[in-house]
Image (cartoon, grey):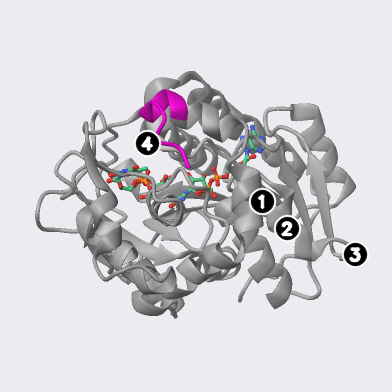
Amino acid sequence: MSFKPTSILVTGGAGFIGANFIHSFVGNNPECSVTNLDCLTYAGNLKNLAALEGNSRFRFIKGDIGDAALVAGILADHKIDAVVHFAAESHVDRSITGPEIFVRTNVLGTQILLEESRKHWQSGVVENFRYLQISTDEVYGSLGETGYFTEETPLTTNSPYSASKAGADLLVHAYHETFGMPTLNTRCSNNYGPYHFPEKLIPLLIHNIINKKPLPVYGDGLNVRDWLHVRDHAVAIETVLKNAAPGSVYNIGGNNEWKNIDIVHLVCDELDSRLGRDAGENRNLITFVKDRLGHDRRYAIDATKLKADLGWTPSYTFERGIAETIDWYLDNQEWVAEVTSGAYREYYEKQYGGGVA
Ligand code: NAD
Ligand code: DAU
């Protein structure tokens, strides 16, 4: 029998995937209320949720997942029966230049959220409860030319970001084993789509092409990522939340592997005609730069378990998803201007010495 949440807490819902999840979940679940706890780091923006302003089933609370008293109060006050935990520091490059905040948010923050969730669940205030940890395929490390990550692949992490996410996953596993807490864990491949912060590859390419700025390609450009539209991820999360057995782990991915340089060419070429430029013109912006330290070579997700157990399948073809995403960025330049001001400029000036749009 499927679990029907009535009041969920989403952490990090002002970020890229959290915001897309909230839009999707609110639309699909008219009887459930949604509380979003987000401290609004550089990556969080309430504009991502503007369409929900005035919706009586949605509330936003500005705060930190590391604030135990705040979390305990939210869980009790709103009789939360499911926690969907997105909040994190999510950018690998930032974890190389400043790992400390990754441990603080992704490991310690998760532990506080888990502990307050455990107390709330054990208090019996709600009849049914689920805690869903949003993890990543990066906890499995790096693949060679062949093979896939399954849920049985050992965790092997190569960046401070992935190490912090794996630390959180192990805590989630421990809370299930030690306390019998009804936890769930999903590990998804690279997402793309609306509201993606333009420090990540695809939105950075779109932003820099529009502004005729260099397109930094790390190393030889032959690293492989497995791309999934963020709305397909959102539906997969809802499917796991409602139908998966407590204690289970599910991979999420759409069998859509691309070498970075091929993605760069694709986005360049899609934008040539949209921007009225000559065929091939945008490719002149490609600039090979120093490789990312500890750069994972290839990710590829085997999502057979999710498809077989719970019947999820992605609905977007990459062709449609990337075209719609590019159009979304062209139509939402005001959003881009807002999120790329201030701290974003400082970060990129430090990273690339002035290649900032
Ligand atoms: P993001 O960086 O866009 O958003 C993170 C959000 O968390 C922001 O709104 C930020 O303000 C908030 N946040 C950060 N620290 C917080 C804290 N201490 N308290 C409260 N809120 C805090 O991230 P994203 O790309 O949307 O990723 C969301 C989750 O999905 C992360 O856990 C990430 O590891 C995971 N994930 C991301 C991808 C991807 O391709 N982006 C793929 C798989 C899994
Ligand atoms: O696989 C899931 C992960 O995907 C998530 O857990 C992370 O939160 C998310 O940031 C993402 O990590 P990646 O490191 O794969 O994504 P990013 O967009 O930073 O980089 C994608 C690839 O492109 C990677 O091989 C590095 C390369 N790259 C990236 C940037 C930003 C470049 O060549 N140039 C760039 O400027």
Residue at mark 1 to residue at mark 2: CA–CA distance? 8 Å
Front residue of 36 and 241: 36
The magenta region covers 349-357
Q: Dot 1 surroundings within 10 Å: few (below 14), some, or many (20 or more)? A: many
Q: Relative to residue 82, is residue 91 depicted above or below?
A: above
Q: Residue at x 48, y 40 (%)?
A: 90
Front residue of 102 and 293: 293
Residue annotated with mark 3: 56
Quadrant housing residue 288: top left
Q: Amino acid at mark 3?
A: Ser
Q: Relative to residue 106, is residue 100 depicted above or below?
A: above
Residue annotated with mark 4: 162
Q: Dot 3 surroundings within 10 Å: few (below 14), some, or many (20 or more)? A: few
Q: Is the residue marked 4 within 8 Å of ligand 2, measured from its CB?
A: yes
Look at the numbered discs 1 and 2 and tell me whether their residues touch, using CB distance below 8 Å: yes
Left or right: 202 with respect to 150?
right
Residue annotated with mark 1: 13
Q: Amino acid at mark 2?
A: Leu
Secondary structure at badge 1 equals: loop
Secondary structure at badge 2 equals: helix
Please report whichever mark, 3 or 1, sits nearer to the chain's N-terminal start: 1
Report if residue 346 is visible in the image: yes
Q: Amino acid at mark 4?
A: Ser
Secondary structure at badge 4 equals: helix
Residue at mark 1 to residue at mark 4: CA–CA distance? 20 Å
x, y percentage for residue 189?
A: 36, 56
Q: Is the residue marked 1 within 8 Å of ligand 1, measured from its CB?
A: yes
Residue 205 painted magenta:
no
Please report whichever mark, 1 or 2, sits nearer to the chain's N-terminal start: 1
Residue annotated with mark 2: 49
